[in-house]
Image (spheres, rainbow, N blue to C red):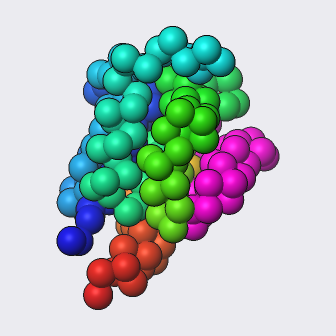
Amino acid sequence: MQKKGVIIQGSSRSEGNTNIISKYIQEKTGFDIIDLKSKEISSFDYDFNNQGDDFIPLMKEIVDNYDVLIFATPVYWYSMSGIMKNFFDRISDCLKTEKDTGRKLRGKSMAMISCGSDSELKEGFEMPFRESANYLGMHYIGNIHTWFENELISETLKIELNTFIEKKIKTVYNNLYN
Ligand SMILES: Cc1cc2nc3c(=O)[nH]c(=O)nc-3n(C[C@H](O)[C@H](O)[C@H](O)COP(=O)(O)O)c2cc1C
């Protein structure tokens, strides 16, 4: 069965700037959006007393339905958002209690989109995504940084985004299914 791609949105506001970027990508790709803010996902627990929250059902939904995962995060204090980091920490559940789900991540593709107020993304921001993909046996497609000027996506950025979508995301996706 052909699986779709998904944009996993990790902003502290569901309809903020990261959502505008996520929707822009959705329009060009037809990928679904999962809003982590709308889920109940507690922080990682060594005792796994949090297994009743939304993380495991969500992760199962992701591995069973999607082959291309695009993580869309705002830049908060030079890092990914806390909501996004929480999600990554919980992937550790998939190395312990949910190994079958974790194994299904292997061979899938990951990309990352950051959204800040500054046009520059500081060195090192991308590393946790690239290395996590590597650790999980996923293919890392790459990243693009976005930012807002007067609450708008600039025309230059739109061109960069379109190129990223066409040359990176769609190339990987089409290679999977065509
Ligand atoms: C807690 C917090 C920390 C932030 N830190 C940074 C930062 O380090 N670098 C930056 O460029 N923008 C920073 N910003 C600005 C946001 O990245 C920017 O406004 C982004 O577009 C917000 O996306 P959102 O609407 O999805 O939250 C910060 C905003 C917040 C709320």
Residue farthest to the bottom? Answer: 178
Assign the C terminus to one quadrant of the image.
bottom left
The stretch of residues the image draws in magenta is 118-144
Q: Nearer the viewer, residue 107 or 161?
A: 107
Residue farthest to the right? Answer: 123
Provide residue 160's location: percent of width, then percent of height: 48, 64
43 to the left or right of 60:
right
Determine whether 37 is above or below 26 in the image.
Answer: above
Q: Is residue 113 visible?
A: no
Provide residue 78's location: percent of width, then percent of height: 69, 30
Residue shown at 59%/20% (left/top)? 44
Say whether residue 24 is magenta.
no
Say whether residue 125 is magenta.
yes
Determine whether 97 is above or below 71 in the image.
Answer: above
Provide residue 72's location: percent of width, then percent of height: 46, 43
Residue shown at 26%/65% (left/top)? 3
Determine whether 23 is above or below 168 in the image.
Answer: above
